[in-house]
């Protein structure tokens, strides 16, 4: 395991080269075991998919990076009309930071806004509407519903 795809690919190439040099033609069976070589994230995702049913995840879950997550929240902002408000609604990055803080601190949005984002307290009701819900994300499609499920969104 390593951190970057580039390093993982180089590591796999080196191991394959060494195995072929030592074992020769029968190296194919050994190099098949290299399917578990890769980045921490790729191997972690593979393990999560392998045990998804046992830990309550859909095996077809999607992992989004921070920018993908911000883009999805921006899509919700737009669909709910918050991108065209008279006073400036918090940006997608701020919305994601608020949402992340609520999830990670297991704190209600009111507490998070009061302690960490006081300039956004006037938007509490609108920000609550951005909260992802499995049943409330039909308009944005299955990709966002999987994202919501992965983050443990509400069912209401």
Image (cartoon, rainbow, N blue to C red):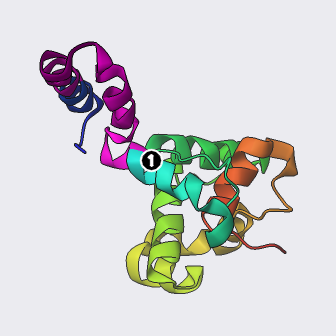
Tell me if residue 116 is in the magenta stretch. no
Tell me if residue 41 is in the magenta stretch. yes
- Is 74 situated left or right of 136 in this image? left
Viewer can see residue 59:
yes
Count of numbered circles on the image: 1
Spot occupied by residue 117 in the image (x, y as percentages of width and height): 43, 72
26 relative to 99, above or below: above
Spot occupied by residue 128 in the image (x, y as percentages of width and height): 69, 71
Question: Observer-nearest residue: 62 or 87?
Answer: 62
Say which residue label 1 marks. Answer: 66
26 relative to 91, above or below: above
Give the magenta-colored segment's residue range.
13-42
Judged by its main secondary structure, the magenta piece is: helix
Q: Residue at x 70, y 57 (%)?
A: 58
Spot occupied by residue 36 in the image (x, y as percentages of width and height): 37, 42
SS at mark 1 in the image: helix
142 relative to 6, above or below: below
Q: In the rendered view of the protein, which quadrant contains the N terminus?
A: top left
Q: Residue at x 58, y 62 (%)?
A: 51
Q: Residue at x 71, y 73 (%)?
A: 125
Extreme residue in the top direction? 25
150 relative to 38, above or below: below
């Amino acid at each position: 395991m390593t951190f970057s795809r580039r390093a993982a690919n180089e590591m796999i190439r080196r191991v394959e080269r060494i195995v072929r040099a030592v074992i020769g033609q029968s190296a194919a069976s050994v190099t098949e075991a290299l399917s578990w070589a890769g980045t921490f994230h790729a191997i972690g995702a593979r393990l999560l998919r392998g045990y998804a049913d046992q830990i309550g995840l859909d095996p077809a879950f999607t992992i989004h990076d921070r920018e993908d997550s911000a883009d999805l929240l921006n899509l919700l902002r737009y669909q709910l009309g918050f991108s065209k408000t008279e006073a400036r609604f918090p940006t997608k990055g701020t919305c994601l930071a608020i949402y992340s803080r609520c999830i990670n601190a297991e704190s209600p949005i009111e507490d998070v806004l009061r302690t960490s984002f006081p300039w956004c307290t006037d938007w509490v009701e609108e920000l609550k509407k951005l909260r992802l819900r499995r049943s409330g994300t039909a308009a944005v499609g299955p990709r966002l519903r999987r994202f919501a499920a992965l983050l443990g969104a509400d069912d209401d």
